[in-house]
């Protein structure tokens, strides 16, 4: 099967000369149709930049991105338009992602009318109601005349999703889409997104720093872990979560506090050699995790960047030293 | 017919929103009042041009509401007749400078690159030239026969600082997530600039327009006061200039002659500035209470 | 023994009166939409040496309550009712009666607060040392060398490279380092109580872990009395001895950490716990709470949680329940806490920990 989205050695640099940083450094990954892919990592790891490049909002400075097998910089005008409509993005901050001076009705009907998805304002109105119902904003008519500031964070995110749905997307980049929403409604938002995947066959790239959310949302999909612009490990979610191989993935999973006192106190601590994350302006040579890695091997890890290598349990790991070692994250009782 | 109805309805809504702020709405009513008095008033109240030696420098009375000037002429009729030019110049100058600033400021911020560099270079040059001396020189070189050309001149000089502000707003708005969402939805640059960015700057633009207008009022009064713009007839600036020259400020009874145009100017300025409080509500839904 | 070590006093006696007692505290503030009842009658004892976590979502009133305790509310907000009693060494004071000077002393020496946004809490043009010394001086401690020694000890305690950090400007430090400096700073004048508002929220996972471990040390080694305010249940699970759940300005449940996580008796607490995923272990289904957090200007009648509650009955719409004893040192404000108890018995929250499918091969 042809990949829906494929990244081939994609890089993105920002700034000039001395200030130049490589936010994304040679990322290759493929996302199949109907898949849920999670991109996890800490701030500055390049996950959002990668999402923006996939959504066509930022051109890569190296490598290429393929949409349904075709490089997006080679698409003709019609194909490019189709690609832009097919890939939509949901942002993190519900307070910034909606225009504060437009009503929900304006926000949703504008793309409908502009792209001739409906004929006339009557139909646009009906379609807007439909879309609001799809994202569980009911009764839909009550929401149409509201301004964003009159809605709660969760409701705003739903409006964002409804707006994205106006152009019948096939691929949604959800960039920390539920991180700023209250705990109690996060799950219902995630379930709503999951329903879109099943009903409308939407493929998801779910970008998050929250491993627990990634695990919940992408249990049937895959996770890619990024660190300082590179993918260090990927694979089917159950494998990455229960049997992480890269020391960075292990450190992340071990560090996450759990909402269960007994469980959280039984987690193994992985002591890093350094608490500080290196600056993108001054990246260490070789594996960029080596100055912090507890398994650092001198003369190996600090020499050349390790490639992602497939492991038999599924996925790839960029650590030749530890890729075949299991580590339990719980202290045996 | 339908269109008329819709327009009336939206006008009604706008007025209702404006009335949420009492002070702003009072300012708005005052602006309407001053404009009506200045444009319609002259048809009903003739300008008193007859010199009456026995009535020089009188205090306000039932006969002369605002008193009389150095030739015994009625000040009230002069105030009524003297507002029109001031308002026309202020509106032309304010609208023109705001238009330039918004158009090119948004373009500069949104397009970036060379366009931005070019526009900013011109702006910086304009900003470094001191305004009033330049005005004085220009006014002494050119002859301003009518108010329109004075308004245009003031408008052409007044945009740089507003342009810079508009540009920086456009720059920050451009990075906002909802603009990115609009790009992702392929809504087009025109839509993004005029439907997404500019409406978010309207509050700021309106306030700047009001300030540009008040600035233009002061500038023209200053020009007239210095005698560099030879306006014939009645004008609050001319009145002020004459009153000053005639030493009206030195006597208890004659002080009215100098105070009245000042009061008229201040009142107009104040009303324009306070009106922005109501206009803010129209353009920024977040500020509306009770909704 | 260094200054930092003997600076901490132990408050272990269980007979000791609690250092902080809130009695029926109400806090209201004015908004454009009308009066907001942010805190509606909170009774709470912060016991000596314990760490108590206030959990709840946005609009639950937890941050307002924290700010109310140290009287740092915005101008439009006011404690309209109730009292905040602070005790130390057998002396009592009403925080509401303190004047400006006494309040400053109170905030540094007695009850220190660490805020959510670490960057805003610093003056950007002053070095860390200058900020610390200014504070110490303002409180009558002007022996420069002694202060410096104390500050260095504190910075070492929070595991920073003290010699380097003390002369750094705030912007030269990373988010995690700033948060640690802030915690060190709050300990400068040896307060009895530390209030932390979302201490780890904006931080990355690995940085968050260093802060959690630091706070653990403060709790375990120094026995500092701490009040955590957080929306993050995991922080509470990590650090709290007791947990209080807040909803719509009231404490709806309070109990030991184990009681709250494994034996919740309020439907809202139960809902929160079931809505939060865990990282370790196999997939588990999550259940979200219906609806959205309440509008504080226009609160529902009766129990404020009833529109979202699966256990709600007619009574809940009419009458608001008070906290009642539901177990040893465990109280909940729900008419149907027994039903919640049955629900938890049927679907236990305390699952057996994930089986060790993977053999540990390390060390």
Image (tube, coloured by chain):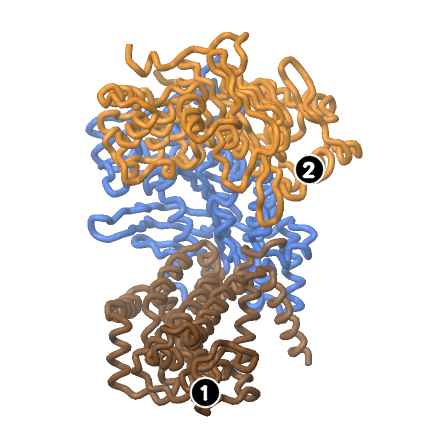
Chain colours: A blue, B brown, C orange
Q: Which mark is residue C308?
A: 2
Badge 1 density bin: few <14, some 14–19, many ≥20, Cα 10 Å: few
Who is closer to the viewer here, B284 or C236? Answer: B284
Residue under mark 2: which chain is it in? C
**Residue at image coords 63%, 65%:** B16
In terms of image quadrants, where is residue C262?
top right
Give the residue furthest to the bottom: B50
Disc 1 designates what residue? B54
User: Where's residue B243, x and y in %?
Assistant: 37, 79
User: Where's residue A4, x and y in %?
Assistant: 46, 52
User: Where's residue B120, x and y in %?
Assistant: 28, 67
Who is closer to the viewer here, C226 or B221? Answer: B221
**Residue at image coords 36%, 21%:** C189
Residue under mark 1: which chain is it in? B
In terms of image quadrants, where is residue C163?
top left
Q: Secondary structure at mark 2?
A: helix
């Amino acid at each position: 099967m042809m990949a829906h989205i494929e990244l081939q050695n994609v890089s993105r640099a920002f700034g000039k000369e001395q200030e130049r940083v490589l936010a994304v450094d040679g990322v290759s990954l493929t996302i199949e149709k109907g898949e849920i892919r999670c991109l996890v990592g800490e701030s500055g790891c390049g996950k959002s930049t990668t999402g923006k490049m996939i959504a066509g909002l930022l051109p890569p400075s190296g490598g290429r991105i393929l949409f349904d097998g075709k490089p997006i910089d080679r698409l003709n005008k019609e194909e490019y338009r189709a690609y832009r409509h097919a890939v939509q993005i949901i942002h993190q901050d519900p307070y910034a992602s909606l225009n504060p001076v437009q009503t929900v009705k304006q926000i949703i009907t504008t793309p409908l009318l502009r792209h001739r998805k409906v004929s006339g304002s009557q139909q646009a109105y009906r379609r807007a109601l439909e879309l609001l119902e799809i994202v569980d904003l009911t009764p839909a008519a009550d929401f149409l005349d509201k301004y964003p500031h009159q809605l709660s964070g969760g409701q705003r995110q739903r409006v964002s999703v409804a707006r994205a749905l106006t152009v019948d997307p096939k691929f949604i980049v959800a960039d920390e889409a539920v991180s700023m929403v209250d705990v109690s409604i996060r799950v219902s938002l995630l379930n709503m997104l999951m329903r879109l995947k099943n009903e409308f066959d939407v493929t998801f790239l779910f970008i998050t720093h929250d491993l627990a959310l990634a695990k919940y949302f992408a249990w049937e999909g895959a996770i890619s872990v990024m660190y300082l612009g590179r993918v260090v490990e990927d694979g089917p979610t159950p494998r990455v979560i229960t049997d992480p191989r890269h020391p960075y993935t292990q450190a992340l999973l071990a560090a996450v506090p759990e909402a269960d006192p007994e469980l959280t106190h039984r987690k193994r601590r992985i002591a890093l050699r350094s608490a500080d994350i290196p600056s993108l302006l001054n990246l260490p040579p070789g594996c960029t995790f080596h100055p912090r890695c507890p398994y650092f091997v001198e003369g190996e890890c600090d020499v050349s960047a390790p490639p992602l290598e497939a492991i038999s349990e599924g996925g790839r790991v960029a650590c030749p030293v530890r890729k075949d070692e299991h580590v339990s994250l719980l202290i045996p009782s | 017919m339908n269109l008329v109805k819709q327009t009336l309805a939206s006008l009604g809504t706008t007025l209702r929103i404006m009335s949420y702020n009492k002070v702003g709405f009072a300012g708005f009513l005052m602006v309407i009042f001053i404009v009506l008095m200045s444009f319609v008033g002259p048809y009903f109240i003739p300008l008193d041009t007859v010199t009456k030696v026995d009535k020089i420098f009188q205090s306000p009375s039932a006969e002369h509401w605002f008193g009389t000037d150095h030739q015994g002429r009625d000040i009230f009729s002069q105030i009524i007749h003297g507002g029109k030019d001031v308002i026309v110049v202020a509106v032309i100058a304010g609208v023109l400078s705001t238009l330039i600033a918004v158009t090119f400021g948004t373009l500069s911020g949104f397009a970036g690159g060379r366009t931005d560099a070019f526009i900013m270079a011109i702006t910086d040059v304009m900003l470094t030239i001191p305004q009033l001396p330049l005005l004085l020189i220009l006014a002494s070189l050119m002859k301003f026969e009518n108010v329109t050309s004075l308004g245009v001149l003031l408008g052409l000089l007044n945009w740089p600082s507003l342009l810079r502000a508009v540009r920086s707003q456009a720059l920050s708005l451009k990075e906002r997530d909802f603009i990115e969402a609009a790009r992702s939805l392929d809504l087009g640059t025109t839509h993004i600039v005029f439907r997404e960015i500019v409406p978010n700057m309207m509050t700021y633009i309106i306030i700047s327009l009001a300030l540009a207008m008040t600035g233009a009022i002061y500038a023209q009064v200053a020009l007239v006061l210095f005698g560099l713009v030879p306006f014939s007839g009645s004008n609050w600036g001319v009145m002020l200039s004459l009153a000053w020259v005639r030493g009206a400020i030195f006597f208890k009874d004659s002080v009215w002659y100098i105070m009245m145009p000042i009061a008229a100017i201040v009142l107009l300025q104040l009303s324009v500035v306070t009106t922005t409080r109501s206009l803010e509500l129209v353009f920024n839904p977040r500020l509306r209470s009770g909704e | 023994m260094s200054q930092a070590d003997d600076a901490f006093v132990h408050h272990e006696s269980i007979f000791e009166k609690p250092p902080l007692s809130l009695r029926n505290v109400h806090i209201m503030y004015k908004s454009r939409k009308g009066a907001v009842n942010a805190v509606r009658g909170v009774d709470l004892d912060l016991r000596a040496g314990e760490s108590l976590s206030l959990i709840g979502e946005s609009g639950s009133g937890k941050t307002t309550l924290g700010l109310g305790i140290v009287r740092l509310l915005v101008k439009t907000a006011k404690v309209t009712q109730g009292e905040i009693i602070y005790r130390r060494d057998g002396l009592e004071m009403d925080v509401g009666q303190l004047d400006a000077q006494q309040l400053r002393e109170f905030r540094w020496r007695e009850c220190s607060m660490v805020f959510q946004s670490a960057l805003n809490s610093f003056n950007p043009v002053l070095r860390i040392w200058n900020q610390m010394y200014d504070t110490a001086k303002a409180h009558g401690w002007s022996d420069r060398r002694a202060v410096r020694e104390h500050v260095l000890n504190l910075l070492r305690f929070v595991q920073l490279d003290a010699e380097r950090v003390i002369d750094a400007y705030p912007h030269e430090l990373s988010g995690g380092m700033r948060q640690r400096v802030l915690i060190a700073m709050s300990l400068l004048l040896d307060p009895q109580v530390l209030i932390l508002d979302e201490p780890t929220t904006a931080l990355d996972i690995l940085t968050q872990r260093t802060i959690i471990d630091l706070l653990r040390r403060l709790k375990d080694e120094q026995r500092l009395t701490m009040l955590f305010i957080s929306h993050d249940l995991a922080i509470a699970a990590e650090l709290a001895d007791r947990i209080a759940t807040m909803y719509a300005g009231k404490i709806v449940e309070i109990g030991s950490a184990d009681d709250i996580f494994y034996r919740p008796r309020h439907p809202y607490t139960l809902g929160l716990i079931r809505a939060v995923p865990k990282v370790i272990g196999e997939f588990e289904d999550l259940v979200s709470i219906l609806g959205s957090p309440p509008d504080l200007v226009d609160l529902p009648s009766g129990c404020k949680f009833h529109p979202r509650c699966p256990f709600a009955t007619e009574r809940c719409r009419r009458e608001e329940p008070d906290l009642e004893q539901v177990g040893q040192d465990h109280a909940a404000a729900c008419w149907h806490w027994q039903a919640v108890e049955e629900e938890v018995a049927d679907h236990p929250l305390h699952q057996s920990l994930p089986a060790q499918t993977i053999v540990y091969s390390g060390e």
